[in-house]
Image (cartoon, rainbow, N blue to C red):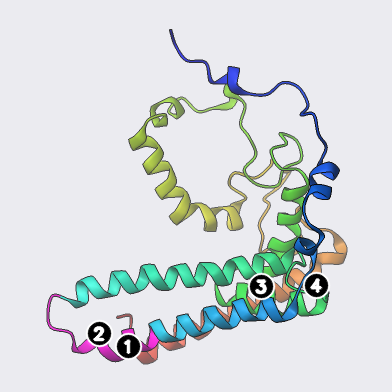
Amino acid sequence: PEFNSLKRVPCSKPPFTLSQIKKAIPPHCFKRSVLRSFSYLIYDLVLASLFYYVATNYFPSLPQPLPYVAWPLYWAMQGCIFTAFWALAHECGHQAFSDYQWLDDTIGFILHTFLLTPYFSLKYSHRRHHSNTGSLERDEVFVPKKKSALEWWAKHFNNPLGRFLEISIQLTLGWPLYLLFNITGPPYDRLACHYDPYGPIFSDRQRLQIYVSDAGVLAVTYALYRLVLAKGVG
């Protein structure tokens, strides 16, 4: 018989509440530590600097075809470290880095901007996502689709190859498309763009910080442009 995945979906409330789960977690897990948070940041900075030093000083002298192996390995390893930077900035957006919002916003802005992510824009939309995760009406990203709303080609992706292609597209194009065009986000009456200070995602009191996020991303983009002119693409 055909397997019905809907039978696995719980239809009743669990026998516990979120507050009960929180009470079961040891209190020290909720204490923020500036020293510990900065230790993670310094550790990642040391690793990123070490990888960059090895790549720029030793890869050019490698005999062929070893550079074609070394550089992709470097990209993967450095990408993991940059993902750690992104995760730290994400926690700053939730004010989990320290007890000081100004410090969290400063560190988060620097790290996310370095990775071409509009910090304050994502901070506000992402918080709303966590408050409404999985909601068909109020989630801000990864809004579940109704079966009746699926495209005709969706059923052809329900296999290992289809899922691999879907994940590949999501990891390469999904992020910029979400920031630019609100792909996978909720419907709005106009374009919802994370770079638009007057977009429907943000309130009036958040507009200035969206401008700051945009200015930071533009500054880093220009710096990368100058770096390419000076060092080349390779």
- Label 3 and label 2: CA atoms lie apart by 35 Å
Q: Which residue is mark 4?
A: 208
Q: Which residue is mark 1?
A: 56
User: Looking at the picture, which amino acid does disc 2 mark?
Assistant: Phe
Quarter holding the C terminus is bottom left
Question: Which numbered dot is residue 109?
Answer: none
User: Looking at the picture, which amino acid does disc 1 mark?
Assistant: Thr
Query: Are the residues tagged 3 and 2 within 8 Å (C-beta)?
Result: no
Report which quarter residue 87 is drawn in. bottom right
- The residues colored magenta run 52-65
Q: Residue at x 76, y 40 (%)?
A: 138
Q: Which residue is mark 3?
A: 214
Report which quarter residue 186 is drawn in. top right
Question: Which numbered dot is residue 59?
Answer: 2
Query: Are the residues tagged 1 and 3 within 8 Å (C-beta)?
Result: no
- Label 1 and label 3: CA atoms lie apart by 30 Å
> Viewer-proximal residue, 14 or 41?
14
Q: Is residue 122 above or below residue 209?
A: above
